[in-house]
Image: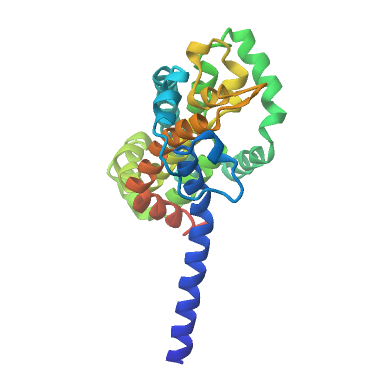
Amino acid sequence: MAKESKVLRIATYCALIIFSVAFFLPFYWLITTSLKTEDQIFRIPPVWIPHPLKWSNYTEGLTFVPFFTYLRNTLIISVSNVIGALLSCSLVAYGLAIIPWRGRDFVFFLLLSTMMLPYQVVMVPLFTIFTKLGWIDTFLPLIVPSFLGNAFLIFLLRQFFMSIPKDLTDAARIDGCSELQIYRGVIVPLSKPALATVALFSFMGAWNDYLGPLIYLFDQSKYTLSLGLAMFSSQYGSYWGMLMAVSTVVTIPIVILFFFTQRTFIQGITMTGIKG
């Protein structure tokens, strides 16, 4: 029995190592390509360790486009999306999980059904609405919707809120707390892992979004980093070395953010599945 357990553990570790290498390989290729010369990038057999290292890809890439202007625009949109998602999704999830009212389950069902709609279906109506509002070529179409809730994030938070013991909210009501006081004083402090998960999802979604800025932004001074990366390609080819160098710089904040929040992130994901 002990021998079988040891073999199973070794097989598990081997599988984990193989999958880890498979997932890490594209990231390794991204970094090494950012340090290659142009003739090394497409050489057959592939150059796994570039020599000499072409660090100038980074300096040339960061000056080829107004990188820091695009970084500022991306941060404004990403941070605003995080704030909007935390406020709107947590309040809606609280109403769907904690407050008993008639038709709550039906509204939750309707909310879940909106997750089945692909973005391409609502893209044209949204563009028409934002055009009539005069929001085109501003950050508003990329920020305001986050303050109106997101079905997936509401679902995530609702599942977490339902795992909080009902006795806590009942006791707070007996003490005379309003629903807003229960939300702020009881639910939010107990939901930090789930809220951190929502914040991370929102930040990653806004940071990596390409289609939204492509549709709504026309002035190059308002471009985000994802649109800036597209400028490294032209009809005559792509500047692959600089593209990979800037892509590495763009990826680093997400990787750092994930490593700093991974414990809370995993805890939040795990605990949202406790109760359905």
Note whether 166 is above or below 34 in the view shown: below
The residue lying toward the viewer, choosing from 201 and 103, is: 201
The image position of residue 266, as x and y in percent, is: 41, 54
Residue appearing at x 48%, y 46% in the figure? 27
> Looking at the image, can residue 200 be seen?
yes
Residue 251 appears in which quarter of the rendering?
A: top left
Q: Position of residue 153 (x, y in %)?
A: 51, 40
Up the image or down, 184 lies above or below 165; here it is: above
> Closest to the observer: 84 or 50?
50
Which residue sits at x=35%, y=44%?
Answer: 187
Q: Is residue 162 above or below residue 65?
A: below
Q: Position of residue 214 (x, y in %)?
A: 60, 21
Rendered residue at 69%/27% (across/down)? 122
The picture quadrant where one finds residue 237 is top right
Instruction: Compare residues 259 and 142 and report the one nearer the observer.
Output: 259
User: What residue is at 55 percent from the left and 23 percent from the top?
Assistant: 227
